[in-house]
Every structure is written in C-alpha cells, then in structure tokens.
Amino acid sequence: MSGLAHYLEDEGLATVIVALVREHIVSMRPPRALWIPFELGRPFGAPGNADLQRRVLRTALALLDKPATGPLLEEFSEEVPAGDDPDWYFPGTLDNTDVLAEAASIKPIWQIARERLARTTVGISGLAPEVAVEYIERFHSADPLPNPRGMAPVSRARFAVDDIKAFYFEAALAQGGHPSTLQLHEWFWNETLAGVLLREFQERARVSDDKNLRLIASSLVPAERCHWFLHGLESP
Amino acid sequence: MVRLADIPEPERTVIADLNCPHYADTPPTTPLAAAQRHVAIVSTAGFIVRGERPMLSSETGYRAIAATVDDGDILCSHVSTNFDRTGFQQDLNVMLPRDRLRELQQQAVIGKAADTHYAFMGATSPEKLEDKARELGRSMLALGVNTVVLAPV
C-alpha cells in the first residue's frame, strides 16, 4: 500500500493512506498516512457505523491540509469497543447429519440474512453455496464434483472455501447483533461440520503431491486457527 | 481494536518480520483546495465485480469498480485468510467507503467523489505493482482525479 502511495504521488496525485500496520508505514515512509488502530480487514471501523467511517475518512483527508515536507503520520484517536455480544447466538438449528445436510439447513437462514443485509458476498467461486460445500467435500474422493469451465479445479476449490465461509458467516448474522470476529470464528471453526471439513481439506492440501494445492493451503484456514488446532490450544 | 501486539501468532510474527522495501522520501504532491479535490479510493482488497475472474495471488494488475456497480456485486478475492471479512460481509463501507465519500461530496468536504474506484491484490511485492500503479495514476489523472485515499485490508 505504501509503495502505491510513492508511485501515485510521483505521477502527480495527492494521496493519503488509511494504515492498519503502523510499523510498515514507519518503515516505508509514504507521504501521508493516518494510522487507525482497528482490526485487520476493517480499515474504516465498524460495520453499520457510518459516523465512525465518515470520521476516519474526514480525518484522513484532513491530512492533505497540513503542511508536509516529509512523511506525515498521524494516529486516529478513536478505537472500536472490543468484546463479544453476549446476546448473539446462531439464529437456527443446524442439521448435523453430515456437512451437506448442515449446508442445506443453513441455506434458508442465509437467505434471511441476504435479505437483511440487502446483498451477499457469496459467489466468487461461481458455485451456489451448497454446491461449493459439496465441491470441497468430494474434492479428494473417487467421485469429485465436475468442475465447470472457466477456472482451474484448484482455484475453484480455493474460492469455494471463501464462499463456504461467507455463506456461514452471513447466515450467522441473519438476526443482526454485534458478534465479535472471534465469536463468529469460534462458532464456525468449533461448532460446524463445515469448519471441520475446511480444516481437513486444508490439512490434505498442505501435504498434497499437487504443488498447486500446497500453494493454496495457507489461504484456507486462518493462520492462528491452524496454530491453535495443531498445538491443541484454546483460543484466547 | 487491534495493534500489532494484539494480532495472534503466527500472523503477528509474519507481519512484524515482513521485509518492507526501502523508498526514498517522495516529495508530496501539493494538494488542491478541498473544493477542487476529485477523490478516488484505491484498495488492496482484491475486489472484483461479480462474474469477473477472481484476482490471483501476486497478481499485479488492478480492477475498476464503477459507481454503477451494485454493492452486492462487489466481491473480495484477496488471497489472505488472515484478516476479518465479517465486517465487509455486513457493510461494504468498512473496506470501500464509497457511500461515505459520496456524502462528503454532498457536504462539500470534497469537490467530487470519483465515478470509479480501484483495487489491487494486496500481499503482493510493492515493486511488482509499480508499472500498473503508474499506469493507473495516469489514467486517473486523465479522468480528472487528483486525490487518492489508499485503503488496505
């Protein structure tokens, strides 16, 4: 990101970075940066908090009004309250017969979430979400699901995993609430068969003879989850 | 809230030990007055428009997200699984605050929100992005954009 700032400024554009990792900004010295102490993946704050998002953006743009002869780094003064939502729970009952039955039981809840959120981020694999689950479930079987044209099988698998996670996490938000990221991940990775499926798929990818599968292994399960599972650790 | 010390291992060490390239200080471009600022957002979330080929790891190109693209057709193809996506799943503006930017235009905090925003794939060596970044810069200037908010994930 800081590299982009150097190149764009050199082309004649005024830039400001909303920066998540302060240490990288200090090292790479872009012309203007606002460091925000938010969670990775949330550079403009919290979902549904338009006021906070606006303040981040206004504060970042205000750096353009400050005289700068060298790199300008300021810190955003607000933080997002941390902590779990004690009232949040998964809004439905999962069919735990097997992972395909679980996915089928998730779908009507996800459809409610889709209406509530007025959008979905599922779809990057090009597969319907329950088909994405089946694609991964049968990937290493003697009878894999056919891969539609347009994407290599391993790439399809990587993006199917992204879709499965989005499918479940969106469903988990069907009734709103403010669950923390940790709270949602605890639920998904520890309480769903899809979480088990993805952990097992990641492990098989990690030791696969297929170089391409090994390459995507680190893009499937969050690194800290792999670490905790591997060492039998509880999440903090 | 997360500071480097709050990021769980092993990701914390990966981020802390990342070998950032050295850049000489770039003389800052003189910003225009607020009313003349035509602002685009450039993200490194690997955004694509639904139906496009997802961006691949270390891809050096960029994608354009036109104002006419519905929020529901903006997908994240970033290679890393080590950042939160549940905020984005609830609210696009957590990563790509294009609604907030339009509001700032309406409030005359800026002159104009760009009609198009852009996305690169993060977790790519910055030097490998130089050619496409400069190309995008020239393209934005040709469209009248003079100010860029850079948004990581």
Image (cartoon, coloured by chain):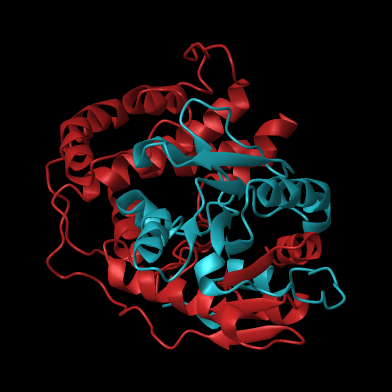
Asked which quadrant contains residue A176, the reply is bottom left
Front residue of this view, candidates B115 and B71:
B115
A68 vs B8: above or below:
below
From where the camera sits, is residue A194 visible?
A: no
Q: Position of residue A33 (x, y in %)?
A: 62, 77
Residue A53 sits in quarter: bottom left
Is residue A31 placed above or below B134 in the rendered structure? below
Residue shown at the point (58%, 40%) measured from the top left:
B64
Q: Quadrant of the N terminus of chain B?
A: bottom left
Q: Foreground residue, A109 or A217?
A: A109
Residue A205 percent across, percent down from the top left: 61, 37
- Residue at 64% across, 48% down: B120
Chain corresponding to cyan in the figure? B
The residue under the point 28% across, 45% down is A170
- B86 shown above or below A114: below
Q: Nearer the viewer, residue A85 or A196?
A: A85
**Residue B13 lies in quadrant:** bottom right
Give the residue at x 33% y 73%.
A52
Q: Which quadrant is home to the C terminus of chain B?
A: bottom right
- Closer to us: B17 or A30: A30
Q: Is residue A62 left or right of residue A93?
A: right
Is A173 situated left or right of A45 in this image? left
Q: Pinpoint residue A35: horizontal percent, then vertical percent.
A: 55, 79
Left or right of A203 on screen, residue B90: left
Q: In the picture, which chain is red?
A: A
Does residue A165 appear in the picture of this structure? Answer: yes
